[in-house]
Every structure is written in structure tokens, then in C-alpha cells.
Amino acid sequence: MTTTPTAPSERAAHARHGYSSYQITLHWTIAVLVVVNWLLGQGMSETYEALEAGQFVSNYGAAFMHICIGITIFLIMLARLTARLRRPVETAADSKHPLLAKLGMINHWAFYVVLLAMPPLGLLAWFAGAGWAGALHSLLAWVWVALFVLHVGGALVHLVLGENIIRRIVRPTAGT
Ligand code: HEM
């Protein structure tokens, strides 16, 4: 039976150099769902604004899809966070460039914050009519774009420096 290390020193000793097949599957599922929901966001915004202006809306298709996919993203992000906290991954060890490794870590945790915050904010805007939540939700949608550009850009910089870290999120390592 395997146990999850709890003490920081124990966790560091158990840190792995990559992700499990479960984590990799969740990563790519989220990537696809977020892009789809981003594209549906335009339709959602139009519906939301029309309702706010007191106009009649006949088609709720995009809004319905947006809400369902958004809640799914939230649940998968919770699963990812749990898996990530249970399985320490050594990121800095793979890079000869500690600053780049640190920036990568900040980028990864910022994704968790943004993608876990967006769905509840969207729900508050839609169901409770909280305009501030809608505005923050839209702002975070653009923060996500910035994070995504830095995420892909960072991976390419690592590649140029001769470190193929992309294989870590493609080829699974043992464990869950
Ligand atoms: C992580 C999942 C989600 C992503 C990536 C996402 C993405 C987006 C995007 C890109 C927009 C358009 C922003 C703009 O152009 O200004 C938007 C608008 C909106 N979304 Fe989401 N969304 C998510 C989850 C949700 C959920 C679960 C709800 C629940 C009802 C929701 C409700 C809304 C509302 C009400 C708007 C209009 C906000 C406004 O115009 O003020 N979203 N979303």
C-alpha cells in the first residue's frame, strides 16, 4: 500500500519528475474544454447583456452549454488540484534555469486560481445578477489568455534551451 507523504521533507524526497496518466488526461481535457468555453463566452455575453437590457431572448443554447461546460471545468480543476497536492512534482529540478522554473510554477498555480474562480463568479453573475462578478469573470477570461500565452511561450523557451519539458505532460510517469 502506498501512503501520501505529509511532512515537507518527506514530500520533497518523494517528488516525481513528471505527471501520471490520470493527471495528463485531466490536463488535456481541461485545455480543450476551456478553449470551447472561451469561444462560447461571446454568445454568453450577448445573452447576458440582452437580458440585462430587458430584451427578449429566444435562444439559450450557447448560455446553457457555457454553464454546463463551466461547471465541468470547475469539477475537473478540483480533481486536478487534489491530484497535484497528493503527488509532489519536482519542477525546478528539470531546469538548469531556476528563474524559468519559478516562473513556470507561478504560471501553473495562477491557472488553478483563475479556473477555480471563474465558474463561481459566472454563476453569481448569471443567477444572482451580480454585475461586478460578471465584470471580474470577463477580466479573468483575458487573464487566462495571458497565462496561456506565457504557458506555451515558456514551454517553447525551455525547448530552445534544450529542455524538452513538453514530454512531461505527454508521457506519463508511474503512480496516480
Ligand atoms: C472556467 C470556465 C469558464 C470560462 C473559461 C468562461 C469564459 C468566458 C468568456 C471568455 C466570456 C466572455 C467574456 C467577454 O468577452 O467579456 C464569458 C462570459 C460569461 N460567462 Fe463564462 N466562463 C466559464 C464559466 C462560466 C460559468 C460556470 C458560468 C455560469 C453561469 C459563466 C457565466 C458567464 C456570464 C454570465 C458571462 C457574461 C459576463 C458579462 O458579460 O458580464 N461562465 N465566460
Image (tube, rainbow, N blue to C red):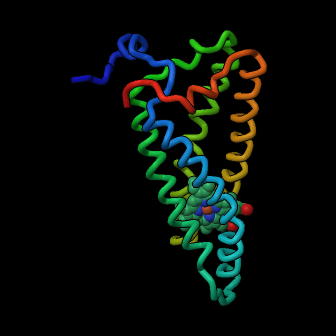
Residue 82, above or below 87 = below
- Asked whether 152 or 48 is in front, the reply is 152
Quarter containing the C terminus: top left
Percent coordinates x, y for residue 137 in the rendering: 63, 57
- Asked whether 143 or 73 is in front, the reply is 73
Percent coordinates x, y for residue 78 in the rendering: 43, 45
Instruction: Tell me what residue is drawn at x 53 percent, y 48 percent.
Output: 29
Instruction: Tell me what residue is drawn at x 66 percent, y 65 percent.
Output: 40
Q: Give the residue at the far left of this rendering.
A: 1
Q: Find ligand 1 in the image and state its quadrant.
A: bottom right
- Asked whether 14 or 171 is in front, the reply is 171
Instruction: Tell me what residue is drawn at x 35 percent, y 12 percent.
Output: 10
Specify the quadrant of the image occupied by residue 163.
top right
State whether residue 133 appears in this view.
no
Specify the quadrant of the image occupied by residue 166.
top right
Percent coordinates x, y for residue 138 in the rendering: 69, 58
Quarter containing the N terminus: top left
